[in-house]
């Protein structure tokens, strides 16, 4: 039995979709940003908050969990700058509460969602896990602080964990049953597809004066189901004792510029986007591309879907979003 906190959110719900194929799953989510409709019906859904120690104790007494996957975090970079208290409280303090109850109940296997934002503005073209972390906003800082806490808990309390640093998660399950639905939506692919579906008048490219071939920012887009599969392998590596502690990047290894993403959306949908060029968004690095060779070498994982497949699946969802 696995506890997935934040399992009603975008990435969490896609992981649950894969996990229910092999495990019994309980989802705990406060629905602050998640959608109950996104939770697979084979999972048991409980509405609640990981910051509530007593509720967590009750939950851990009711179920015998072999592990916990943690997706219950706030993840808007801009909001983290204007409201850092929210980010440090929800992303760090609540995580400490969750870890406290886990350890009290002898649940030692933990999968932690981290982010490429921990690298800040890296000096290298391809980022592996040895690249120095240097987050430039409270969101990224909240994630690296938890990563550091996990290192100490592993030494002191025998916590086993895998930290997964996501690059740009995108796409939806192939059936179009669940997909990406944020409010507000800040991510490029859903914004472009919402525009092409007629829900937005135009789209903006945030800066075309970066030091990249076409001047727009380059990112590493990874299909959310590929991402989900990495979580299952990571959890298995803890259960098998193959890993005690590990940190892996999750990306495709290919970079695509904002312009290339928009062109691919146009190709997949057969529609033309109305694009305006605006100034840079604060805090955007020119290029973020992952090396995921560590997880390939250690756990045999690699991304299987390319940008076009990512956008095809996302388009299926965005034509008929259910929540
Ligand atoms: N972006 C853009 N227009 C938008 C949304 C995003 O030009 O409406 C750019 C953004 O500046 C970044 C890239 O698209 O260079 C990916 O942004 P997103 O927010 O999807 O992910 P991030 O890399 O910031 O996590």
Image (spheres, rainbow, N blue to C red):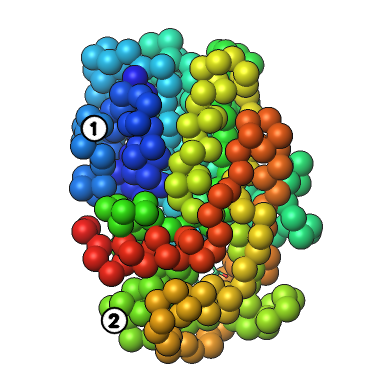
- The residue indicated by pointer 2 is 198
Find residue 171 and name its label: none
- Number of callouts: 2
- Residue drawn at (21%, 45%), measured in percent from left and top? 36
Q: Position of residue 215 (x, y in %)?
A: 68, 81
243 on left or right of 65: right
Q: Position of residue 230 (x, y in %)?
A: 53, 38
Q: Secondary structure at mark 2?
A: loop
- Look at the picture and state if 269 lies above or below 13: below
- Residue drawn at (46%, 41%), measured in percent from left and top? 228
Find residue 42 and name its label: 1
246 on left or right of 174: right
Looking at this rendering, what residue extends furthest in the right direction?
A: 124
24 on left or right of 287: left
Residue 162 visible, this orientation:
yes
Quarter of the figure with the C terminus: bottom left
- Look at the picture and state if 13 lies above or below 70: below
Mark 2 and ligand 1: say if the CB distance to the nearest ligand atom is below 8 Å: no
């Amino acid at each position: 039995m696995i506890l997935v906190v934040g399992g009603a959110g975008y990435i969490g719900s896609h992981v649950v979709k894969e996990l229910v194929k092999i495990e019994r799953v309980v989802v705990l989510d406060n629905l602050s940003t998640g959608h109950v409709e996104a939770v697979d019906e084979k999972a048991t859904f409980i509405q609640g908050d990981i910051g509530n120690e007593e509720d967590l104790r009750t939950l851990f007494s009711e179920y015998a969990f072999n592990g916990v996957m943690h997706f219950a975090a706030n993840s808007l970079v801009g909001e983290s700058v204007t409201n850092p208290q929210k980010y440090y409280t929800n992303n760090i303090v609540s995580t400490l509460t969750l870890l406290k109850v886990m350890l009290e109940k002898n649940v030692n296997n933990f999968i932690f969602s981290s982010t490429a934002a921990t690298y800040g503005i890296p000096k290298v073209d391809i980022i592996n896990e040895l690249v120095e972390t240097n987050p430039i906003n409270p969101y990224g800082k909240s994630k690296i602080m938890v990563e550091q806490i996990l290192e100490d808990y592993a030494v002191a309390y025998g916590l086993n964990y895998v930290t997964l640093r996501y690059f740009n998660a995108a796409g939806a399950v192939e059936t179009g049953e669940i997909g990406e639905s944020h409010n507000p939506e800040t991510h490029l692919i859903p914004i472009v597809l919402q525009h092409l579906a007629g829900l937005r008048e135009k789209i903006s490219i945030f800066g075309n004066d970066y030091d990249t071939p076409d001047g727009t920012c380059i990112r590493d887009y990874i299909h959310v189901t590929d991402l989900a599969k990495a979580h299952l392998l990571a959890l298995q590596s803890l259960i098998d004792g193959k890993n005690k502690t590990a940190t892996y990047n999750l990306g495709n290894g290919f970079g695509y510029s904002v312009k290339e993403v928009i062109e691919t959306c146009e190709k997949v949908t057969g529609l033309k986007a109305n694009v305006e060029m605006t100034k840079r968004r604060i805090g955007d690095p020119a290029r973020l591309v992952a090396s995921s060779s560590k997880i390939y070498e250690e756990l045999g994982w690699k991304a299987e879907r390319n940008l076009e497949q990512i956008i095809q699946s996302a388009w299926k969802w965005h034509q008929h979003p259910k929540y």
